[in-house]
Image: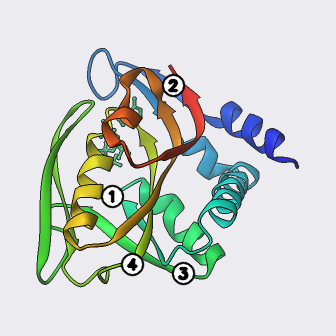
Amino acid sequence: MCDQEKEALLYRSVREFPDFPAPGVLFRDITPVLKSPEAFTASIDLFEGYVRKNFPQVDAIAGLDSRGFLFGPLLAQRLGIGFVLIRKKGKLPGPTESVSYSLEYGKAEIEIQSDAVDPGQKIVIIDDLLATGGTMKAAIELLQCKNAEILSCLVLIELTSLKGAEKLQPHRVHSLLQYD
Ligand SMILES: O=P(O)(O)OC[C@H]1O[C@H](OP(=O)(O)OP(=O)(O)O)[C@H](O)[C@@H]1O
Ligand SMILES: Nc1ncnc2[nH]cnc12
C-alpha cells in the first residue's frame, strides 16, 4: 500500500459521534483504526516515515494520556527508542512536575516524572488528536521545564477549525488526517 492509500484507509476508519461527550462536540472516534490491523499498521507506518525522514536524531517519543499511549509505544519500538508517559494528574509515582490546561470539553492537569527525560534530549510528542491544542501545549511546557528539545508534535487527527496548531507555534504539528 502506498502512503496515499494508507491515508485513505485511515480516513475511512474514523467514525464521528455528534454531541459526545458534551452537546456541540463532534467526537472523532479512532477505535475502528485500532480494530483493523491494516489501518493501525498504516498509521504507525506513516508516523514512522515522517519521523525517519524529518527527525532522525530523535531520542524518545513522549505520549499523552490516554490515547497517545495507543500509538506512541508502537512508534517508539519501530524507531528503536524509548517511550515517555505524560499522564493525567495523580497517576505517576515519585517526584513529578505538572501543568494545568483547558481542552475542547473541559479542564485538566497533566504531569511527568521528574526523571523521565534528560536535559537536551530530543523529543517527539504524540497524541491521537489535536483540538484546541491545550493538551499539547501543556505537554510542551512540561517537557520544556525539563529542558528537553521538542522536535515535533504528531497527531493522527487535527481539527483545523479549532486552530490548535497556531497555539503551539513555533513548534510544528504534523497530522495524518485533517478535519474542519
Ligand atoms: O487539543 P485539546 O483541546 O487539548 O484536545 C485534545 C485532547 O483531548 C483528548 O483527550 P482527553 O483529555 O479527552 O483524554 P483521553 O485521551 O483520556 O480520552 C485527545 O485524546 C487529546 O489528548
Ligand atoms: N472532537 C473530538 N473528538 C475526539 N477527541 C477529542 N478530543 C478533543 N476534542 C475531540
Q: Quadrant of residue 169?
A: top left
Circle 3 sits in a helix, a strand or a loop, which is it?
A: loop
User: Between residues 26 and 61, which one lies in front from this camera angle?
Assistant: 61
Q: Which residue is mark 4?
A: 121
Q: Which residue is mark 2?
A: 16
Which tag, 3 or 1, sits closer to the chain's start? 1
Q: How many numbered circles does the render carry?
A: 4
Look at the numbered disc 1 and say if its residue's Cβ is closer than 8 Å to ligand 1: yes
Q: CA distance from mark 2 to mark 4?
A: 37 Å
Which tag, 1 or 4, sits closer to the chain's start? 1
Q: Amino acid at mark 3?
A: Ile
Q: Is residue 28 left or right of residue 33?
A: left
Q: CA distance from mark 3 to mark 4?
A: 12 Å
Closer to the observer: label 3 or label 4?
A: 4
Residue that appears at 43% across and 56% down: 68
User: Between residues 172 and 100, which one lies in front from this camera angle?
Assistant: 172
Which tag, 2 or 1, sits closer to the chain's start? 2
Closer to the observer: label 2 or label 1?
A: 1
Classify mark 1: residues with Cα within 10 Å, few (<14), some (14-19) or many (20+): some
Q: Which residue is mark 3?
A: 81
Circle 2 sits in a helix, a strand or a loop, which is it?
A: strand
Indicate which disc residue 87 carries: none
Ligand 2 is in which quadrant of the figure? Answer: top left
Which tag, 2 or 3, sits closer to the chain's start? 2
